[in-house]
Amino acid sequence: MSVNTLEFNELNHSVVFKGSVISLNPLSFKLSKALADSNGDILSVNAISAMVWGDRSASAETIK
């Protein structure tokens, strides 16, 4: 999946940015993808929690 100049590879949790491959841990990958998918819109704590952690809840402190 590509978002602007980022290309997300969900199979190996990597992002390609300007030709460079960046390997991320699964949590960092989900967070980066959620922010990229927002197209610059501000996301609430609840929206980030739902997009990254799904059904499991995350506290506001965790998201900081």
Image: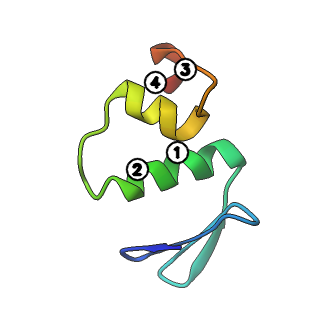
> Which amino acid type is marked by label 2?
Leu
- Dot 2, crowdedness within 10 Å: few (<14), some or many (≥20)? some
Give the distance between the C-alpha atoms of the residues marked 4 and 3, in whole angstroms.
Answer: 5 Å
| 22 vs 17: above or below | above
Q: Is mark 3 in CB contact (under 8 Å) with mark 2?
A: no
Residue denoted by label 4:
64
Q: Is residue 8 left or right of residue 36?
A: right
Task: Check residue 62 in the rendering and tell me which mark sits there, or answer none.
Answer: 3
Among the two numbered marks 3 and 2 on one chain, the one whose residue lies closer to the N terminus: 2
Q: Residue at x 46, y 49 (%)?
A: 34
| Tag 4 secondary structure | loop
Among the two numbered marks 1 and 3 on one chain, the one whose residue lies closer to the N terminus: 1
| 46 vs 35: above or below | above
Residue denoted by label 1:
31
Residue denoted by label 2:
35
| Tag 1 secondary structure | helix
